[in-house]
Image (tube, helix red, strand yellow):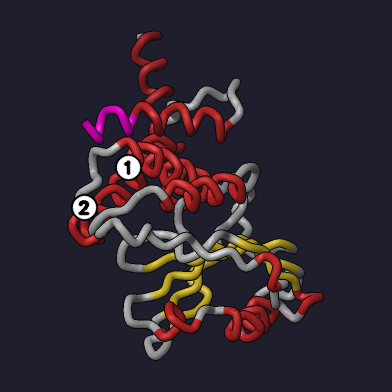
Amino acid sequence: MRGTVKFLFAYISVFLFLVAFADAAEPVRLAYSEKMGVTIFAYPDDSGQWCRAKLGVSILIKDGSPLLTQGIDGMLPKFGAMFGDKCAVALSASVAVYKASDRSLVEKPFTVAKADNWRRAATVLQTAAAPEPDVAPSTVQCDHSLAAGDYFVAACVVRGLEASRQSDGLDDARARQVDAAKSLQCVAQSMTRVTDVAYQAALRIVGSAAISPLMDFADGLRVECKKAAAELLK
């Protein structure tokens, strides 16, 4: 009987954790524009609050959006005004910009501030490097390359931190994903597969409670993501 009670308690604990995680993983959609081909999300922190002094923002841009060629800097003050309207306490935002089609980073994550009218200084504009001219990305399948493994781990860590509302180490993890993407020269379908599998692995890892509470969360997540890469990118 005692063993049954322990089993039921453990089962209920895991169930409640998974329910809490399911809620925690959901970002909040702040805005959407079909004309501009852009969707803006805010990510809650570990307390469940998305509206805070420093927002965590992801911007998804569709293929064909003018923002992919023109850049988003001209729109940042408008986006910032929207942040202020929806969250009066917002003073700054950590921003990551992704292509909606394959979830690849458009440029290195950056921070904007209300004090600067939500603009960023020219010195922090750092776009992702283009493929080398002697390489034809349209002919390369990279799912099982060493570079794909590095990118998989980087993308897995970023998604795991976002899904678990961990802000510590998130900016550094996003920067690592950008650096890893520079070496990943492949067709769009291949890039999509690697990114999607990495994101799915991250959600499984966080949902499974595989990371020991005695470890730094980001370090533990990186270890588990490396295990997933070794298994899934054989």
**Residue 151 falls in which quadrant of the image?**
top left
Local crowd at mark 2 within 10 Å, few (<14), some, or many (≥20)? some
**Going from the N terminus, do you reach mark 2 or mark 1 first?**
2
Local crowd at mark 1 within 10 Å, few (<14), some, or many (≥20)? many
Element under label 2? loop
Residue in view at x 26 percent, y 28 percent: 231
Mark 2–mark 1 Cα distance, whole angstroms, equals 12 Å
Element under label 1? helix
* Residue extending furthest toward the bottom: 35
Residue in view at x 55 percent, y 60 percent: 108
**Residue 19 falls in which quadrant of the image?**
top left
* Residue extending furthest toward the front: 134
Position of residue 166 measured from the top left corner of the image (x, y, whole percent): 59, 45
Looking at the figure, which quarter contains the N terminus? top left
Q: Is residue 10 visible?
A: yes
User: Which dot, 2 or 1, sits closer to the camera?
Assistant: 2
- 22 and 193: which is toward the camera: 193
Q: Amino acid at mark 1?
A: Ala
Looking at the figure, which quarter contains the C terminus? top left
Residue hosting label 2: 140
Left or right: where 119 falls relative to 228: right
* Magenta span of residues: 228-234
Left or right: where 176 falls relative to 116: left
Q: Amino acid at mark 2?
A: Val
Our reading of the magenta stretch's main secondary structure is: helix
Image mark for residue 27:
none
Residue in view at x 42 percent, y 62 percent: 130
Image mark for residue 148:
1
